[in-house]
Image: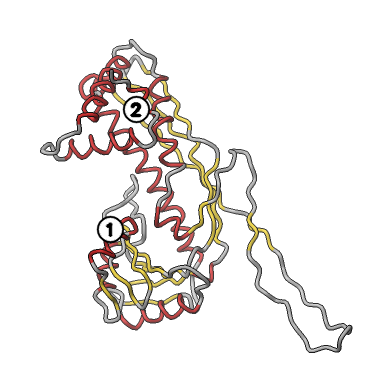
C-alpha cells in the first residue's frame, strides 16, 4: 500500500517530485514515473480536501516547512560554497563572530643566544558578519487548489525554493561587488572580456592563491566569451561531465571558468550576477551560515476564498574575511 507519509520522510524525494511535475507542466510530452504519479494522486486528493474545508490550512504550512526547510538550509549550492565556506547552522538569536586570519606581522631578528629583540605583534581581529532575513508573502486561491491540486502544490514548492536561493545568491554577490571599488583588484574592459584584462585578472588571482583551485565567475554569456580568448582551454567531454554541477566550460590560465545561467534572476527581475562583471577568486573569500529555521504561516480568507502564506525565518549570515582574494573586471 502506498503511504505518502513514508515517501515524505525520504530526503529530497518531494523536491524531486515537484521538479518532475514542473518539467511535465512545461513539456506535456514528458511522463512522470509510476511513483511520481502515486505521489501526485495523494497530494491532489489532500490539496482538494484543504480547498473544500475538510482539512486545516495549517497542514499546508506544515507541508511546506517539512519539504522546503531541508532543501534551502541543508543542501549546498556548489558555486556559493566555492566562494564562502559553509559553517554549521546557528540559532535564530545566536550571535556569530568570525576570527579574521590576521596578517603575519611577526618579525625575526638576528640575536645573541639568550638575548632579547624588539617585540612584534599580531592584530587578532573579530568581524561582525552581515545578517540577512528573507521573506515571501503570497497566497493560493482555493479554486486553484480545487482545479489543479497537486500541480499548484508542486509549483509553489519549487518557486519558493528557487526564489529564496536566488535572492540569497544575489544579496551575497551584491555585497561582494560593493566591497571592491578600486586599486589593483579591478580592471575595465570595453564590450566584452579581452585578453589584456583577463591576463591581469589571472595574474592577480594566481598571485593571491593559498590553496585550492582559482576560478573566474560570471554569467554564462561572459563565460562563453572568456572561453573564446586565446589562453583558454576547453575541457574534454569527460572532464565536463565530472564538473557539470559547477558549470565549468573551460579554463583560462589555469583558472576554472564557472558560470551562472544568464537567464537566472530573482522575482524582482534582478540578475543573480551582474552581466557586466567577471570575478576572479583565489579560493574561498569568507564564511557563511544559516540562522534559525524557516517558518510558514497560513491564514484562510473565507470571503475571498484564498489562503495567505508567509514564508519567513529564512535568515543567513556571512562575512568576507579575505577581500584581497577577489578581482573584479567591469565591462562597460
Dot 1, how many residues are within 10 Å of its Cα: few (below 14), some (14-19), or many (20+)? Answer: some
Q: Residue furthest right?
A: 114
Residue located 29% across and 58% down the image? 244
Residue located 30% across and 16% down the image? 51
Residue 4 location, quadrant: top left
Of the residues under marks 2 and 1, which one precedes in the sequence?
A: 2
Q: Is residue 184 left or right of residue 331?
A: right
Q: Which mark is residue 296?
A: none
Q: Quadrant of the C terminus?
A: bottom left
101 lies above or below 307: below
Q: Is residue 21 left or right of residue 214?
A: left
Residue 194 at what x, y percent from top left?
A: 30, 79
Residue 332 seen: no
Residue 81 at what x, y percent from top left?
A: 45, 56
Q: How many marks?
A: 2
| Residue at the spot of label 2 | 7
Residue 230 at what x, y percent from top left?
A: 27, 81
Which residue is more in the foreground, 253 or 308?
Answer: 253
Which residue is more in the foreground, 278 or 104?
Answer: 104
Residue 107 seen: yes
Residue located 32% across and 38% down the image? 159
Residue located 33% across and 75% down the image? 252
Dot 2, how many residues are within 10 Å of its Cα: few (below 14), some (14-19), or many (20+)? Answer: some
24 lies above or below 330: above
**Dot 1: element:** loop
Q: Nearer the viewer, mark 2 or mark 1?
A: 2
**Dot 2: element:** helix
Q: Is residue 92 left or right of residue 67?
A: right
| Residue at the spot of label 1 | 262
Amino acid at each position: 500500500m502506498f503511504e505518502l507519509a513514508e515517501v515524505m520522510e525520504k530526503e529530497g524525494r518531494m523536491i524531486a517530485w515537484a521538479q518532475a511535475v514542473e518539467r511535465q507542466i512545461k513539456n506535456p510530452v514528458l511522463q512522470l514515473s509510476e511513483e511520481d504519479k502515486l505521489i501526485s494522486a495523494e497530494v491532489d486528493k489532500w490539496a482538494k480536501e484543504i480547498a473544500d474545508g475538510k482539512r486545516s490550512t495549517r497542514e499546508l504550512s506544515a507541508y511546506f516547512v517539512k519539504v522546503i526547510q531541508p532543501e534551502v538550509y541543508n543542501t549546498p549550492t556548489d558555486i556559493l560554497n566555492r566562494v564562502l565556506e559553509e559553517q554549521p547552522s546557528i540559532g535564530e538569536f545566536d550571535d556569530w563572530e568570525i576570527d579574521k586570519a590576521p596578517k603575519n606581522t611577526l618579525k625575526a631578528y638576528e640575536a645573541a643566544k639568550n638575548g632579547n629583540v624588539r617585540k612584534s605583534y599580531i592584530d587578532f581581529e573579530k568581524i561582525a558578519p552581515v545578517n540577512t532575513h528573507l521573506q515571501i508573502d503570497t497566497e493560493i486561491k482555493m479554486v486553484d487548489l480545487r482545479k489543479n491540486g497537486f500541480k499548484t502544490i508542486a509549483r509553489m514548492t519549487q518557486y519558493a525554493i528557487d526564489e529564496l536561493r536566488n535572492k540569497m545568491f544575489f544579496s551575497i554577490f551584491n555585497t561582494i561587488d560593493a566591497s571592491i571599488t578600486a586599486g589593483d583588484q579591478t580592471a575595465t574592459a570595453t564590450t566584452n572580456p579581452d585578453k589584456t584584462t583577463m591576463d591581469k585578472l589571472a595574474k592577480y588571482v594566481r598571485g593571491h592563491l593559498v590553496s585550492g583551485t582559482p576560478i573566474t565567475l560570471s554569467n554564462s554569456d561572459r563565460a562563453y566569451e572568456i572561453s573564446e580568448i586565446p589562453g583558454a582551454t576547453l575541457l574534454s567531454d569527460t572532464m565536463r561531465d565530472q564538473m557539470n554541477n559547477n558549470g565549468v566550460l573551460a579554463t583560462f590560465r589555469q583558472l576554472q571558468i564557472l558560470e551562472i545561467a544568464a537567464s537566472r534572476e530573482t522575482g524582482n527581475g534582478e540578475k543573480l550576477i551582474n552581466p557586466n562583471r567577471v570575478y576572479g577568486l583565489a579560493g574561498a573569500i569568507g564564511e557563511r551560515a544559516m540562522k534559525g529555521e524557516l517558518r510558514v504561516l497560513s491564514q484562510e480568507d473565507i470571503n475571498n476564498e484564498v489562503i495567505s502564506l508567509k514564508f519567513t525565518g529564512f535568515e543567513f549570515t556571512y562575512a568576507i574575511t579575505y577581500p584581497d582574494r577577489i578581482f573584479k573586471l567591469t565591462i562597460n
